[in-house]
């Protein structure tokens, strides 16, 4: 079959001509071909394999392009990369690989196109289009990858035990592709992942996180997390989640399975936001429930303080996985810590004071917090579901109303510490903090408006209570 229409971009013509000048055969392989056949639009990442030196081909292509792009060479891996307009092209020489037991870094030798296709992770990623003049656009499909694309199957070209043991990251890639494409992992391949699950321990956390991000960014992330749990990989990479699995029963009292609930919440949030870190917050919002689970004869199962415990666990998890410990981590922590606050509001009468405190504590993230809490409604009871959502709508309206009137988001006190020091002729001291706290509390409670005049008056009264004298009285 010929697919010249997949190669209409000028870059392919230049690669073809450059390969001819070097007397090499060259092929487009992998994701670009797969996505074209799946009608997913033009990919911006192109992998080219040369029967010979990929680095030499990259340099020749750069010479022949009008933009003369810089070629990045990775000698260790025998690869090179260049950017042309909005496209990134990676070049590699065809090769065969062998692996040591304790490493996913292969021993590489020059090879044929067949060798190179054999080393690919999945049949749907081994599809290649020829760039040679004689058969430009011809599809080379030695493992029936086209059939697997049509049948929506993830399958390894060779023995799956060897494929996954050689490079255990491929197990996560199989699960990630199954999630992104909504494909099924072929039965023997899935069994092989389960048999080799422990091998994931030799993969760096950074590489694992890349795959986790892609699963979380998918349309239905639960597909991936269910597969990670089913195959036994999840307990090695996110034991905090597997600890949520299961239902305990004492004296006829049960609690919901917090693992499956969590996955429902993640899918719900995925329908409403592309924010990766809010998706992480949904995934981790209940991780504090496993260590705080208790049974009380009076009230049944409790998870007191699980939000606080969960927020501490977020830091430890991010640190272990070598994820960023910056504002992204702090955002996830805050979402986990506050994840029950709007739910409590939605159950009770919504007071201005409670809303002011919610907005004050959540700051710019109050909308994200509300989105998370709405996603947390997984009840199958239609009446309860509608009641919660209607209540959350009231809370959202109240947030807008209170914020327009009281301006407590990213609160700045109307009276500054410097003004308090000047008024009472104070040096930095405990009394300044007491006065500022009193003003903040009065505003949040609605006792005074968030205005300077009212806050200044309260400052004078509070100072008098503390036995302070203004500079005029001294």
Image: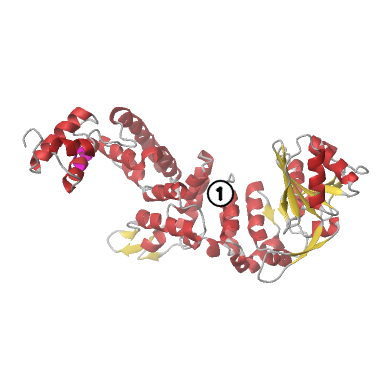
The residue tagged with tag 1: helix, strand or loop? helix
307 falls in the magenta region: no
Foreground pick, 146 / 107:
107
Dominant secondary structure (helix, strand or loop) of the stretch shown in magenta: helix
Quadrant location of the C terminus in the rendered image: top left
Label 1 packing within 10 angstroms: few (<14), some (14-19), many (20+): many
Give the camera-side residue of 464 and 408. 464
**Residue 175 showing in the rendered view:** yes
Residue 162 location (% of width, % of height): 73, 67
Q: Is residue 403 left or right of residue 106?
A: left
Kindly identify which residue carries mark 1.
216
In the rendered view, would you say 191 is above or below 64?
A: below
User: Against 101, is 84 above or below?
Assistant: above
Colour mapping used in the image: secondary structure
Q: Quadrant of residue 294?
A: bottom left
At 33% from the left and 42% from the top, the residue drawn is 361
Q: Quadrant of the N terminus?
A: top right
Q: Position of residue 70 (x, y in %)?
A: 72, 43
In the rendered view, does 328 fall on the left or right side of 38? left
Q: As drawn, which residue projects farthest toward the right? A: 134
Q: Return the residue found at the far bottom.
A: 101
Left or right of 250, for residue 152: right
Q: Position of residue 215 (x, y in %)?
A: 59, 50
Left or right of 33 on screen, residue 229:
left
Query: Does residue 6 appear in this view?
Result: no
**Magenta stretch containing residue 439, yes or no?**
yes
Which residues, given as a range, are shown in magenta?
437-441
Q: Is residue 338 above or below residue 300?
A: above
Q: Position of residue 116 (x, y in %)?
A: 81, 57
């Amino acid at each position: 079959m010929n697919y010249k229409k997949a190669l209409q971009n000028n870059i392919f013509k230049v690669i073809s001509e450059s390969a001819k000048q070097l007397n090499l055969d060259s092929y487009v392989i992998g994701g670009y071909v797969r996505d074209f056949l799946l009608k997913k639009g033009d990919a911006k990442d192109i992998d080219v394999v040369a029967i010979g030196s990929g680095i030499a081909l990259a340099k020749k292509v750069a010479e022949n392009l009008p933009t003369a792009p810089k070629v990045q060479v990775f000698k260790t891996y025998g690869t090179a990369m260049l950017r042309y307009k909005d496209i990134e092209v990676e070049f590699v020489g065809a090769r065969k690989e062998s692996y040591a037991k304790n490493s996913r870094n292969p021993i590489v030798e020059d090879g044929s196109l067949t060798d190179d296709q054999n080393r690919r992770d999945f049949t749907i990623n081994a599809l290649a289009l020829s760039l040679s003049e004689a058969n430009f656009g011809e599809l080379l499909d030695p493992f029936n990858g086209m059939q697997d694309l049509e049948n929506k199957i993830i399958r390894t070209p060779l023995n799956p035990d060897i494929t996954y043991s050689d490079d255990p990251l491929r197990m996560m890639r199989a699960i990630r592709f199954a999630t992104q494409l909504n494909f099924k992992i072929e039965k023997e391949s899935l069994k092989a992942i389960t048999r080799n699950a422990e091998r994931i321990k030799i993969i760096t956390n950074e590489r694992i996180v890349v795959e986790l991000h892609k699963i979380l960014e998918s349309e239905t992330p639960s597909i991936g997390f269910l597969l990670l749990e089913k195959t036994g990989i999840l307990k090695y990479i996110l034991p905090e989640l597997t600890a949520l699995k299961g239902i305990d029963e004492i004296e006829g009292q049960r609690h919901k399975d917090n693992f499956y609930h969590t996955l429902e919440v993640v899918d719900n949030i995925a329908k409403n936001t592309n924010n990766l870190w809010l998706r992480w917050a949904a995934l981790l919002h209940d991780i504090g429930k496993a260590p705080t689970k208790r049974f009380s004869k009076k009230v049944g199962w409790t998870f007191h303080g699980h939000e606080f415990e969960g927020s501490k666990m977020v830091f430890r998890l991010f640190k272990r996985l070598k994820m960023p410990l910056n504002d992204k981590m702090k955002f996830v922590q805050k979402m986990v810590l506050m994840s029950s606050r709007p739910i409590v509001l939605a159950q009770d009468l919504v007071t201005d004071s409670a809303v002011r405190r919610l907005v004050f504590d959540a700051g710019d993230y109050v909308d994200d917090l509300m989105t998370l809490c709405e996603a947390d409604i997984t009840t199958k009871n239609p009446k309860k579901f509608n009641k919660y959502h209607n209540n959350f709508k009231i809370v959202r309206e109240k947030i807008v109303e209170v914020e327009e009137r009281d301006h407590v988001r990213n609160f700045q006190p109307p009276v500054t510490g410097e003004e308090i020091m000047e008024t009472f002729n104070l040096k930095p001291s405990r009394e300044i903090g007491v006065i500022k706290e009193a003003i903040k509390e009065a505003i949040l409670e609605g006792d005074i408006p968030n205005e300077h005049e009212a806050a200044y008056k309260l400052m004078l009264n509070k100072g008098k209570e503390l036995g302070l004298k203004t500079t005029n009285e001294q």
